[in-house]
Image (cartoon, helix red, strand yellow):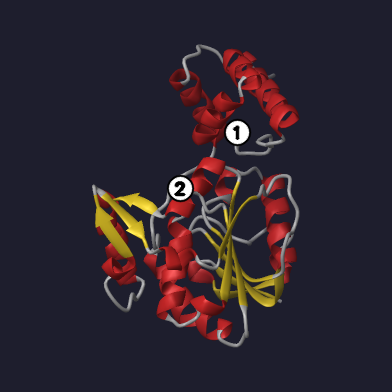
Amino acid sequence: MQTAEDLEIRLLLDAIFLRYHYDFRSYSPASLKRRLNVAKLQMGTTTLSGLQDLVLRDPARFAQLLQFVTVQVSDMFRDPSFFAAFREKVVPELFTYPSIRIWVAGCSSGEELYSYAILLREEGLLERTTLYATDINPEALRKAELGLYGIDRVQAFTENHRLAGGKCSLSEYYTAAYGSATFDRTLRKNVVFSDHSLATDSVFAEVQLVSCRNVLIYFDRTLQERALGLMKDSLCRRGFLGLGSKESLMFTEHASAFRDFAAGERWYQRC
């Protein structure tokens, strides 16, 4: 039997979909409930029904809610061994393509995007690569385009870069001033930033690599299968898929379309 709170959440998510065409109805219920309750308090209402009233009447309040509902936790070169495997095993395969297209799905505020851009520059591939950086959160995309991060985060970024096999100091890629690090705008010269939802949108390009890390863990099983289907259909034959450390193709309906490439690091190759 549904609780009153469960019903409020269902009505809120239905209303958001009808009003703004953002579909959170297949997100992991426990994570979503926790985030909505935090948003409710931070946005000055005592009930989820009150939160619904706020966001339906004011698009600016809905934009505020997005900052709570969408996940924006990342680091540059997060899980360095994943990027080391990319450098050592995937990059040699990418060299065989005259031009390369990479889709960073759920790019959030851009840390993963810049990780790929830096690594590709170090390996001599950035100039012939187009990167598609997508997210459902316009504010996150704006931050990604700026390439601006707190200087207090740079030490961790630098150590991750080193562990991922960085070929020089990370400081060569950013300028520090006023408590922030701004990454070189040439890193995003070939980047296309775009709003895209894995819940409602379709395939938009054929690519050689899809990176979608620590996104699927926030979806229920049905939405995970939909998202993986989009990624599979986006990849050319022998293209690569990179997932998060707690994500896997095992037991999904798309598993047979891939082979383990560096499975310990969650790299898969399209058959």
> Who is closer to the viewer here, 87 or 43?
43
Q: Residues within 10 Å of mark 2 (few under 14, many from 20)?
A: some
Percent of width and height locating residue 120: 46, 75
Residue drawn at x 32%, y 79% is 167
Residue 6: give its label: none
Image: 160 above or below 135: below
Q: Left of 180 or right of it: where is 44?
A: right
Q: Quadrant of the N terminus?
A: top right
Disc with the residue nearer the chain's start (2 vs 1):
1
Image: 240 above or below 3: below
Q: Is residue 82 visible?
A: no
Percent of width and height locating residue 236: 71, 74
Q: Amino acid at mark 1?
A: Pro
Q: Left of 257 or right of it: where is 136?
A: left
Q: Is residue 176 visible?
A: yes
Q: Residues within 10 Å of mark 1 (few under 14, many from 20)?
A: some
Residue ranking furthest to the bottom: 96
Q: Secondary structure at mark 2?
A: helix
Residue 57: image quadrant is: top right
Percent of width and height locating residue 151: 26, 51
Q: Quadrant of the C terminus?
A: bottom right
Image: 233 above or below 15: below
Residue drawn at x 59%, y 70% is 130
Q: Secondary structure at mark 1?
A: helix
> Who is closer to the viewer here, 227 or 62?
62
Q: Which residue is mark 1?
A: 29
Q: Which residue is mark 2?
A: 143
Q: Amino acid at mark 2?
A: Lys
Residue drawn at x 63%, y 61% is 250
Q: Left of 53 or right of it: where is 237?
A: right
Residue drawn at x 47%, y 52% is 144
Q: CA distance from mark 2 to mark 1?
A: 27 Å
